[in-house]
Amino acid sequence: MPVTAVIGAQFGDEGKGKILDYLTANADFVVRYQGGPNAGHTVVPHEKPVVMHQLPTGILREGCTAISGPGMVLSPGDLLNEIQQLKSQGEFRGRLLISERAHVILPLHRVQDAWEEEVRGAMRTGTTGRGIGPAYMDRVGRFGLRMADLQRPELIHQKLELLYTAKKHMTGTTQELPPKEELAAQLVEEGKALAPYLCSTEPILWEAAREGQHILLEGAQSALLDIDYGTYPFVTSSHPTAAGALVGSGLPPQELDSVIGIVKAYSTRVGSGPFPTEALGPEGERLRERGAERGATTGRPRRCGWFDLVLTRYAARLNGFTSLAMTKVDILGGEPEVPICIGYELPNGEQAEDYPPVLAEDLERVTPRWRTFPGWAEFTPTLMRRLHEEGWRALPRELKRYLSFVGEEVGAPVTLVSYGPRREDTVEIPVGGLEPASALEEWRST
Ligand code: IMP
């Protein structure tokens, strides 16, 4: 499919980096369309893990053009470090382009991120502290600097002057901020260093789409962290959803051919906010340990829980998933039973199947209804070898049933399964390959 969006279907950290890296084998272009250094994609292209924050996964593939797109907010200094780091690891293999329209995260945005969280107190979002929200606020408020400005020293001075004046009006002080002149000089230098990568990326993508080249639109965070459709206010400040992939890349809607939803076999969340299927106590602890669930960006332990069909059905409708990729199925290997949330009971007794309550306060108070599946076998070296040799058919029978159930209930088949961090720990399942979920009746219990 020439243009494919790859979207997190849960609360982020579904393993998008791993799946994207697998898919880039057939991609000519990979475009990150939103977010900034709040995201962290961990990829294991060879032996060593590589963590990327602002660079698209396509940079790891020779012949692939990786675009940090117009919808992103970028921290120039961190971006230069990331480029340097990848080069020193020998993993900077593709061609990098950075959109001139992307907005600049300034040191003051980090300062603002910290005090905003302080102000929120008990209602704190649990942001990554990277200044993402404040940078997007200045974008919408029309005080922002864009990457194109960094090529024009006189504009940097002019726009910083305006921004600092605005901040003084809003907060009463600019004392906490780095001196303006120092910052301007730093931005001029960073602009010079980034100049070889900066360009207008939309015309390149329009041309590529016209020629039928393969373009992957790489989401960060996830549908449930979308500023409008996520669990507001416990969300990020951009649109990780499929519509956001178009706005954030500049491609017109009719170019989008397919939308892959990435789901983990269970659920995790970092930061605050409702999480109806959260497993507290030893159960959650076990998932965290087994899945090594720590944030790639902040190192914070992730909250862990079970698969939530209500939220995933909602994400599927919102994004138009045409298929699903399920990751980390190996982590649940050896669990005697695997619960899955099939619906919510709301405090007023009503049921929800595919549309969660709009208010985070209400989502906090739903009671999940569960179905429990028998677990599947551990991913032993023998099983891994069989999977490498025979493909998806070697997946444990109970897991195949779980995949079939999820695909049917969500309305998009699971066509990719990841059972380890390495590129090769992935199998493709042809559409219609799995037994239908109706064959599952005997496995169900409430
Ligand atoms: P921000 O994007 O730093 O403003 O954080 C807003 C919310 O999104 C917080 O709950 C973060 O933990 C969450 N978040 C931001 N980036 C990621 C990510 O890449 N994975 C998972 N959660 C994220």
Image: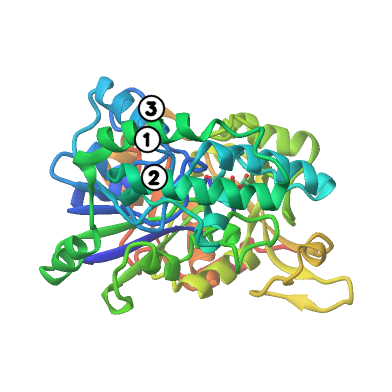
Q: Earlier in the sequence, mark 2 or mark 1?
A: 1
- At a point 74% along the width and 38% down the height, the residue shown is 283
- At a point 29% along the width and 32% down the height, the residue shown is 45
Q: Earlier in the sequence, mark 1 or mark 3?
A: 3
Q: Is residue 28 above or below residue 357?
A: above
Q: Label 1: few (<14), some or many (≥20) within 10 Å?
A: some
Q: Which residue is label 2 attached to?
A: 156
Q: Earlier in the sequence, mark 3 or mark 2?
A: 3
Which one is closest to the eye, mark 1 or mark 3? 1
Q: Label 3: few (<14), some or many (≥20) within 10 Å?
A: few
- At a point 41% along the width and 43% down the height, the residue shown is 157
The answer to whether 177 appears left or right of 202 in the picture is right
Q: Which residue is label 3 attached to?
A: 49
Q: Which residue is label 1 attached to?
A: 79
**Residue 265 in view, yes or no:** no
- Residue 82 x, y percent position in the rendering: 36, 30
Quadrant where the N terminus is found in the figure: bottom left
Quadrant where the C terminus is found in the figure: bottom right
Element at badge 2?
helix
> Which amino acid, mark 3?
Pro
Element at badge 1?
helix
- Residue 264 x, y percent position in the rendering: 52, 49
Q: Quadrant of residue 50?
A: top left
